[in-house]
Amino acid sequence: MNIKGKTTLTFDCYGTLIDWETGIWDGFQQLLQTNNSKLMRKTCLEAFAEIESTVQAQQPTKRYPEVLQLTHKLFANRFALKTSPELDRRFGNFIPFWPAFPDSADMLRRLKAHFKLVILSNVDRISFAGSNERLGVEFDSIFTAEDVGSYKPNPQNFAYMMRNLRCETSNILHVAQSLFHDIKPATDAGLNTVWIDRQGLVDGGSWGATAKIDNPPQADIRFSSLREFTEFACKALQGLIL
C-alpha cells in the first residue's frame, strides 16, 4: 500500500477517535451503583457489544441515542438490575460526555495538513456534533448512520459514503479500530484499511464493547494508536519510509 497515492482518510469515530468504552462504562455507573452491582467492566462491555449490535441490526433506522436507551434496558434485564425510563434516557444521551483518546485531536490536526478527513460513524448528527467538539477539527465530510438509515457493518454505509464522496476507491484509506464494524466491510468494499488496534487484540487483549468476528479480516497495516499511524504517514509522505 502506497500512502502517497491516498488523498482521503475516512475514519470511524467511536472506538477509534472517541474512547467509547470508557464512556460506556461511565454511563453504566448509575445503574450499577443503584443496584449495588459488582459487575466488572469486562463483563459489562462484552454484554453491551452483543446487545447493541443486535439492536442495530434489528432496528436500523432507530437513532443512536434510542439504540443506547434500549440497549441499557435490555442490559439491565439480562443481569436482573432495576432500571427506569429516566436511567435509560440518561445512558442514551451520554454520548457527548464520552472522552476523546489523548492522541486524537493533535493527530487529526497533523493529518489534516495532508489529507481530506471524513467521518463514517454509527451515530446520529447531533450526537456526533457533541463529540466533534472534543476532536477540535473540521472534517471535510461527515456521514452518519442517521443519514444512511442503517448501521455498520451493513455494506450500505460504505456504499453511501463512497457514492457521496465521488472519489476513486484507490484514493481512500479507511482508518478504524473495529474489525467488526469497519475493517471487514471496508475491505469487502474494496478499500485499503488501517487497523488502529486500541484494544491490543494481537497481544491477547479483550474485544470489549466491539462485537467479536469469526475469521477476522487482514487489514493492510496495523498500528496500536492514532499517533503511531500519524508518525508513519508523515514519514511516508516525506519519503522516509518506502
Image (cartoon, helix red, strand yellow):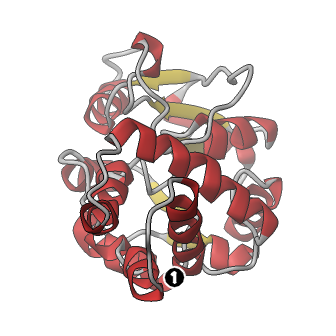
Q: Is residue 208 visible?
A: yes
Of the 4 image quadrants, the one containing the N terminus is top right
Residue 101, placed above or below residue 58: above
Please identify the quarter of the rendering in which residue 94 is found: bottom left
Please identify the quarter of the rendering in which residue 89 is found: bottom left
> In the displayed structure, does residue 94 sit left or right of residue 164?
left
- In front of the other: 116 or 176: 176
Location of residue 61 in the rendering, given as x and y in whole percent from the top left corner? 75, 78
Please identify the quarter of the rendering in which residue 63 is found: bottom right
Of the 4 image quadrants, the one containing the C terminus is top left
Q: Residues within 10 Å of mark 1 (few under 14, many from 20)?
A: some
Secondary structure at numbered mark 1: helix
- The type of residue carrying mark 1 is Arg
Location of residue 9 in the rendering, given as x and y in whole percent from the top left corner? 50, 49
Residue 239, placed above or below residue 100: above
- In front of the other: 19 or 237: 19
Q: Is residue 121 visible?
A: no
Location of residue 239 in the rendering, given as x and y in whole percent from the top left corner? 35, 21
Residue lying at 75% horizontally and 68% vertically, measured from the top left: 150
Residue lying at 70% horizontally and 64% vertically, measured from the top left: 55
**Number of numbered discs visible in the structure rendering:** 1
- In front of the other: 185 or 66: 66
Residue lying at 42% horizontally and 69% vertically, measured from the top left: 139
Residue for badge 1: 125
Residue 199, placed above or below residue 123: above
Residue lying at 57% horizontally and 80% vertically, measured from the top left: 66
Location of residue 17 in the rendering, given as x and y in whole percent from the top left corner? 36, 52
> In the displayed structure, does residue 53 sit left or right of residue 36?
right
Residue 76, placed above or below residue 234: below
> In the displayed structure, does residue 239 sit left or right of residue 34?
right
- In front of the other: 170 or 185: 185
